[in-house]
Image (cartoon, rainbow, N blue to C red):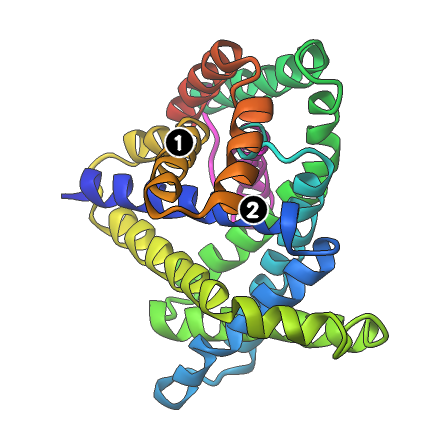
Amino acid sequence: MWIGLTFASLVMWSLMNVIDSYFIEDVYRDEYDGLIISALFNLLPFLGIFFVKDFSLMTIVMSSGAGFLMMLSFLFYLKAFKYHNDPSAIQIAWLLSAPVVLILSFIFLSEKLDWVKYVGMAVIFFGGIVFSFFGHRINKKMSRLIPIMVPAIILYALCTVMMRWVYEVREVNFFDGFIWFCFGGAMLGIGTCIARRKTVTKKYFFPVVRKYWKIFLAAELVELVAVFFQQTAIEKTTNVALFATLESFMPIMVIIVMLATIVFLRMVGNKKEKEIISDIYENNMLAGLKWKIAIVVLMAYGTYLIG
């Protein structure tokens, strides 16, 4: 059962990547537009505040802080998309978060590391170095993706460790932690709106929200479903290492889902959207495909050792 849930979460996350790829190409002026819209939609789950039982200061600070950091990592993730719109390459760079989470867990949660985990981290970092060093042979922009993604990776890792502390050390139930997590993300969205109030104008921003609100809402629902499948799979898994390894194949799943999206758009006749996504798929994602798959397999093996 948990393998099916893991597969479902991979599909949902991959679909989110396709949606982000399209919006960063054709809708958002910059990464801040994407941040504001995504962060503000975190207010929807926060309506569940009426059912929250844990209002302790430490739970609120840690969970909200993690949500804040998660959305901040999303900003750099979108910045990487804006620089080079290749979801598969960005997901390969994202695989570096696994060893960073492990290192931070060792520092803040006193998690023990054995020699196998050290080998796993070395394999993943080696894969990242190879990806960055040889990426310019395929696309000059690809080699710079990891430096751009470094802040996103570190912020995401901090967020993960904070939520592990909330759930494992403080033993907060999933619902309460998730609601306060969404609150933190929404606060970043509101703060960004205030800071960029001159650009969040009636002339551009609100017409875009009105035009695409259904897709924005659908995207956020897809993300919530992805989180649900992912967290349920973690809870039910009988092999954490295998679960982590399966998740490492996200870059390949993104390529498959993007191809399926192109076929679907061709069937329903959305010519403009099909052309935009097809261009991203053919010119960016298929570039160096065999090389990307080899890097993913290598880093997945490192993830298996860590798990």
Q: Position of residue 211 (x, y in %)?
A: 56, 69
Q: Quadrant of residue 297?
A: top left
| Left or right: where 260 falls relative to 64 | left
How many C-alpha atoms fall within 10 Å of the one at disc 1: few (<14), some, or many (≥20)? some
- Element under label 1? helix
Q: Between disc 1 and disc 2, whose residue precedes? A: 2
> Which secondary structure class fits the magenta region best?
helix
Quarter of the picture holding the C terminus: top left
Query: Farthest residue toward the left?
Result: 1
The amino acid sitting under disc 2 is Tyr
| Left or right: where 84 falls relative to 175 | right
Quarter of the picture holding the N terminus: top left
- In the image, which disc is placed on residue 38? none
| Left or right: where 108 falls relative to 31 | left
Q: Which residue is mark 1?
A: 259
Residue drawn at (57%, 75%) of the image? 210
Q: Are marks 1 and 2 in contact (CB under 8 Å)?
A: no
Q: Position of residue 102 (x, y in %)?
A: 52, 37
Residue drawn at (64%, 49%) of the image? 26
Residue drawn at (52%, 78%) of the image? 43
Tell me if I can see residue 49 in this picture. yes
Comparing 112 with 192, the one in front is 192
Task: Assess whether residue 91 is covered by the magenta stretch.
Answer: yes
The amino acid sitting under disc 1 is Leu
Q: Quadrant of residue 6?
A: top left
Q: Which range is magenta?
A: 90-115
Q: Which residue is mark 2?
A: 22
Q: Position of residue 10 (x, y in %)?
A: 35, 41
